Each structure stands twice: as structure tokens, then as C-alpha cells.
Amino acid sequence: MQNLQSITTLDNKLSELFERAGGFYGKHAKNILRILTALVMFFLTEKLLVLIPFFPHRWVLFISAVSAASALRSKSLSFSITWVTLSLSLSYQNPVMGGLAFLLYAVVSPAVLSCSYLDFLIYSSSFYLMFYGLEFFPIVLAGLLYGAKKATKVSLVTFFSGFAICSILPFSTLGHLTLDFSTSLLSRPPAKVVSISKIAASILDFGSEIGKLGTFASKLVSGVANSQQFIVLLVGWLLIAVIPAYVKEAVKKYGHVATLLALIGSSYVPFLAVSFIYPEVPGFKPNAFNVLSFAFVVIVAWFVSEILESARRVARTQSTSIPQTFQQVSVESVVSQNVQERGKQDGVGAVERMESRINALMRELEARDERNENENNNEGDNERGGV
């Protein structure tokens, strides 16, 4: 009984904490999201332009800073700067890959333009955090905020983005993603001097680059077809996206503490399932690092999601209370105005009625005086006639 009371007390304290934090976030959400997006875009741009060489490092830092500064005003502009410069780097390494990157930009950019800052931050941070093995944090956060469908989309985008990077780079591990085959497309060092002629030179060498791309594509296809880990990894990533969303929906009615414990416990189901099917997947081995890091990821994602949901509730409450207040004020003002106008009308009517009565009395008095005067005149005439 005492434990239950302690849990209830802790739930109440957490609710108060989330309400206060949600209120603060709601007031400053625009600035918070823009600053976080700018930070993510700076480090993501710098990381990608270093991994796919073309620009010297000073150029890389400058482009990353410009992308970050642009994110404070426009997420789509920041995305465009990063993607276009990355496409130029790919064009320097292989013109066909650069051309494909530009085509893909034309497909993706409308979606970036239409999404919110929070959505863009989730997608971009999930890709950047792969370099540190924390890519499951934005995926779980998306599931807790938006549900399993949105989390699945974020998970797939992150998975195949990491797969593309691992495929064209000389390493085969990125975060929890590990390929059991090796491919590489990049062979040129960064250019000492940035000029159009550097890219033009690679484009003029189009024939040999096509040959390299053909070899790369055949190795990639055969590697995926013969891989023992690809499907298992993909299933594991999907489970990580789906399970937290369904678990939270099922147990949130029991309070914050029960929800958090259920999320932590269920989060290890993907690890156990993948390691049972194929024990050699490094990112899903139930070792100390994976267990502790993923528990940390789930706790932080849950904490952030509760703050964001609290901010949403506050926003919805304010949006519904304002029309009611407006309506109430409008009705009260209209009623008050009607009463005042009625009072004014009654006052005017009373004055008019009083004036009409006075005028009628004056007319009656004047008529009586005229009659008296006429009678007096008639009596005087009779007396003179008698004399």
C-alpha cells in the first residue's frame, strides 16, 4: 500500500514537472527547434563533407556554418545547401552518383519544405546520431509522439541512409548497422583547390566512371542478395520503431512510472529477437553497452516526448479557451450594451412623455384663460348694452 502511494506521489510530481517544462517549451518552441536544427545541420554537414571528400576542410567548416545559420531562418534552405554541396562532392568522386544525388534532391526537397521543424529535426538527427550509435533515440521519440506509422518511416529513412553511406565508403559499420560485405566507391582525396574544372575533369572521364559504378552496383546487389544480416537488421529496426509506440498506447493509462518501466522492458524484445535469429549481428547483441545505451535512449526519448505532449495539451487548452472567452466577453458586452441602450431609450422616452404632458397642460391652461377672457368680455358687453 505504501509502495502504491509512493508511485502515485511520483506520478503526480512527474506530471507537474512535465506541465512546467511543457509550458516553457510552448513559449519558446520556435527558437528551441531552430537552434537545435542549426546545431544538427552544422555537425551533419561537416561530417558528410569530410566523409565524401572534395572540399578542403576550411571550405567544409564554412559551408557547415552557412548551413547552420540558414537553419535559423529556413530548414529547407539549410537542407538545400547541405545536399547540393554533398552532391558536388559526389560528382567529384563519381559524376553518375552526383547526378543521381541531384535527381534525388528534386524528389526530397518538396517533402522537406512541407514538414515541420520538429519533423525535420527528427529525421536529420536520426541520421547524424548514427555516427555515435544513438540513432534509435529519434526513432523511439517519433513512435512515442506520432505512433508506429511515423516511427516506421523514420526508421526506414535512417536505415537506408546509413546503408547508402556504408555502401559507398570504405567502412561497413555505422551505428547499429553492420554490413557483412564490403563495397566502396570513393577513391579521390579532397581537392587542394576548389574549381569547376575539378568536377569537369571527372565528368569528362565519364566512361571509366561508368565502369567503376557498374562494378560497385554489381558488388552491392550480390552483397545484399547473399547477406545473412540485411533482412534481420531491417526487421530489428522496424521492431524498435513499432514496439514503443504500441506499448505506450497500451499502458499509459496506468501512469508515468508504469509506462516508463514497460517501455524499458519491451525495448529489449528486438535485441532478443534478432540475436535469437542471428547471433552475429553486432548492433543487436545483448551486451552491456547495447543494454545500457538503449535503456538510456528510451528514458530520454520518453522524457522528451512527455514534455512535447504536455506543450501540445497546453496549446490545445489555450486554443479552446480563447474562443470561449471571446464568446463570453462578446455576449456580456452585447447584453450590457443592450441594457445601456434600453436604459437610454427608457430615459429618453420618459423625458419625451414628461414634455408632452407639460405641453398638454400648458395648452389646456391657455385654452381656459381664453375662455375666461371671452366670458368676461361678453359680460362687459351685456352690461354696456343694458345701460
Image: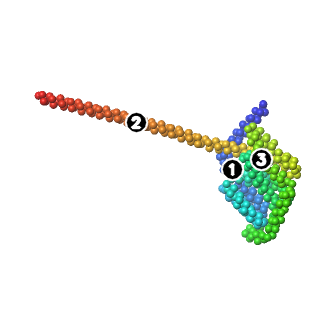
Earlier sequence position, callout 3 versus callout 1 = 1
> Image height check: is 263 above or below 223?
above
Mark 2, residue position: 349
- Which residue sits at x=82%, y=50%? 236
Q: Residue 125: x percent and y percent?
A: 74, 53
Choose between 297 and 355: the one closer to the eye. Answer: 355
Instruction: Check the image and name the residue furthest to the right.
Output: 279
Q: Earlier in the sequence, mark 2 or mark 3?
A: 3
In percent of the image, x 29 and y 34: which residue is there? Answer: 363
Name the mark on residue 260: none
**Amino acid of disc 1:** Ile
Given this view, does label 2 or label 3 mark the residue nearer the observer? 3
Identify the image quadrant of residue 97.
bottom right
Q: Which mark is in front, 3 or 1? A: 3
Three-letter amino acid code at the position of disc 3? Val
Q: Which mark is residue 32?
A: 1
Q: Secondary structure at mark 2?
A: helix
State the quadrant of the N terminus.
top right
In this view of the protein, which residue sits in the foreground, 52 or 384?
384
Res 250 visible: yes
